[in-house]
Amino acid sequence: MAVTLTAGFMSLLDVSIVTLALPSIQDGLDASVSGTQWIVSGYALTFGLVLVTGGRLGDAFGRRRMFLVALSAFVLTSGIAGASSSEEMLIAARLAQGVAAGMLTPQNTGLIQELFHGAERGRAFGMFGATVGLSTAIGPVLGGVIIAAFGDDGWRWVFYVNLPIGLVALALAARWLPTSAPRRKGILADLDVLGMLLLGLAVLGVLLPLVNSEQGGLARLWWMFPLAAAFGWLFVRWERVLVRRGRAPVLHPRLYTDTPGYAIGAAIGAVYFCGFAGMWLVFAMFFQQGLGFSPLVSGLLVTPCALGSAVASAFAGRAVARWGTRVTITGLVLSALGLALVAVLVPVVPDAALGWAVASSLLLTGIGGGMVISPNTTFTLDRVPTAMAGVAGAALQTGQRLGTAVGVAVLASAFHAGGTDGDGYRTGLMLAMVCAVAFTLVALTLAVLDARRNPRRRLATRPAEAGPST
C-alpha cells in the first residue's frame, strides 16, 4: 500500500508542483509564455487522456505488470524533463510523463479494490484520499522549497526529485506487489481499440480548449466541444454494440447504470474538483503577483490546507464505515464555508494580515476536502466488480481531471476579471472564491440528493467479484 501510494503521490504531485517553477523555467530555457503554459497543461492533458485506457490495460494484463511498466516510464521521463536543454524538449518530455502518470494512477485504485474490502477498504481509500489531497495542496509548497534550495537550476530538481523516490518505489514494488495473471488468453486481440480511440478523442475535445484557456483556447477551439460530444455519443453506441456481441468494452455502460452509487459519486467528485483543484493557480497568482510574496512564502501559506486535508482524510477513511455519506456532506459544508470565508475577508483585511487570514480559512477548506475525497471515492467504487476496478477508478479520476481543467479555466478567468492593480487582485480572488463556492454547493446538492435516495446505504462487507452482466 505504501509503495503504490508513493508512486501515486509523485504522479499527482507533478500536476501542481511545476506551477511555481514556471518563471525559473522561462529564464533558464528562454522559453515563451505559451511554451511554459504547455509545460503545465500538456502534462494535465495527456494525464487525463489515457486514464481509462490505463485502467483497462491494468484490468486486462494484470495491475502489477502495468504498475511496474508505467512507473519505470514515469521515472525515465522525469529524468529527461530535468535534463531538457530546450523548450521543445521539455514540452515533449512532459507530454510523455503525463502518459506514464495516466497509466500509473489507475493501478492504485485497482489494487485497493483487489486487496481490501469492507472497513479495511474504507481505511485504504482514506489513505488514498489523503494522498490525492496532500499531493494537490503540497505541490506549491514543495516547489517553492526546491527552487529556494537549488537557485537558478531549481526547476530541474523539481523533476529530478522523482528519480530517487521512483527508483526505490520501483524496487520495492517489484518485490512486494502481488502478481496477477491476465484475465484470459488472447486478451490483446480482444482489446477495444476503437473504443479507446473514440473515448480519447472525446476527452481531448474537452480538455484541449480548457488547458489552453489562458491563451484564448476557449475562443479559438470552441468547435472542439461539439466534436467531443459527437465522439462521446459514438463511443457509447460502440460500447453497447460490443456488449451485444459478447465482447469486453473499454468502459462497460452498466458500470454507470447497474453499479449502485457509481454515477452520482463520479459526478460529485468531478464537480468538487472544479473548485478544489482550480483554486491553487489562483492563490499562486494572488500571493506572488498581487502581494509580491516569494514562491516559498506563497507555498507555505497554503500548507494549513494540505495538513488539514491529510489529517481529515485519515479520519474520514475510518469514519465512513460508520457514518456513511454524512461524512462527505459534512466535508462539503466545511469546504464551502472555508472558501466563502476567504471571499468575505479578502476585501477588508489589510495586506499585512491578509496572508494569515487566507491561510487560516484554508485550514477549514482543507479539513473539509479531506472529508470529501476519500469517503466519496470509497462509496463510488465500493460495489464495482473487482474485474473492473482499474477502469472504474480511471473513469472516476478522468472526471476529476476534467473538473480540474474546468475549474482552472473558470477560476482563472474570474481572477483576471478583477484587474491587475492592487484592489483588482483582491476583487479577482473574491470572484474566484465565489465561483469555487458555487461548484462546491453543486457537489453538496448532489451528495444530499444521493443521501436522501439511499438513506441506509453502507459499505459492502465483501468485494463484488463478477462483472456486469451482458
Image (cartoon, rainbow, N blue to C red):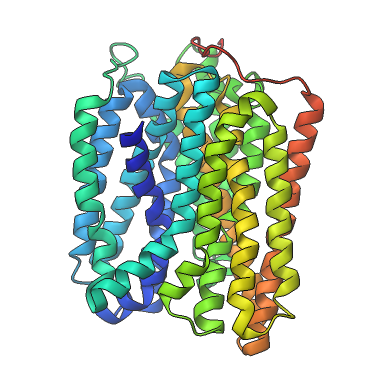
At which x and y percent is residue 304?
Answer: 54, 60
Front residue (pair 323, 160): 323
The relative height of residue 44 versus residue 141 in the rendered view (above or below) is above
Residue, x 34% and y 38% (percent of image)?
104
Asked whether residue 249 appears in the rendered view, the answer is no
Q: Residue furthest right?
A: 452
At which x and y percent is residue 409?
Answer: 58, 63
Residue, x 53% and y 11% (percent of image)?
462
At which x and y percent is residue 400?
Answer: 55, 45
At which x and y percent is residue 66?
Answer: 29, 31
Q: Quadrant of residue 247?
A: top left
Q: How many marks?
A: 0
Q: Quadrant of residue 373?
A: top right
Residue, x 33% and y 42% (percent of image)?
6
Q: Residue furthest bottom?
A: 421
Q: Quadrant of the C terminus?
A: top right
Q: Quadrant of residue 152?
A: bottom left
Left/right placement of residue 208 relative to residue 2 reads right
Q: Quadrant of the N terminus?
A: top left
Residue, x 24% and y 67% (percent of image)?
156
The relative height of residue 237 versus residue 138 in the rendered view (above or below) is above
Left/right placement of residue 303 relative to residue 59 reads right
The relative height of residue 366 versus residue 189 in the rendered view (above or below) is below
Front residue (pair 244, 258): 258
Asked whether residue 383 appears in the rendered view, the answer is yes
Left/right placement of residue 238 relative to residue 319 reads left
